[in-house]
Image (cartoon, rainbow, N blue to C red):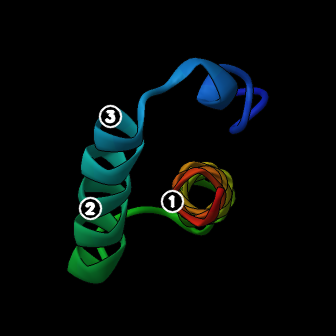
Amino acid sequence: MSDPAADVASLSYEEARDELIRVVTELEQGSATLEQSLALWERGEALARRCEEWLLGAKQRLAA
């Protein structure tokens, strides 16, 4: 996983949320190496940002 945020922009809210749940679960298991954990953390951060973008967009549409 060279760029943890490479394809995040193309994900739907549900796809990003589901993958974020998977990433968190994997991190909580604690079986990954330090390098793998860092990559997962970075991927999780990118996924969380994507979810926030979707939610902010929805909030703006509702406010309009």
**What label does residue 15 carry, if any?**
3
Q: Give SS at disc 1.
A: helix
- Residue type pointed to by label 2: Ile
Quarter of image, res 49? bottom right
**Percent from the top left, x then y, of residue 50?**
62, 48
Q: Residues within 10 Å of mark 3 (few under 14, many from 20)?
A: some
| Front of the two marks 1 and 3 | 1
In terms of secondary structure, where does tag 2 sit? helix
Disc 1 to disc 3, C-alpha distance: 22 Å
Question: Furthest-front residue in view?
Answer: 64
Left or right, 42 with reference to 29:
right
Q: As rendered, which of 21 and 51 lies closer to the eye? A: 51
Residue 27: x %, y % from top left: 36, 72
Amino acid identity at mark 1: Leu
Residue picked out by circle 2: 21
The residue that disc 1 covers is 62
For image coordinates 28% across by 81% down, the residue present is 28
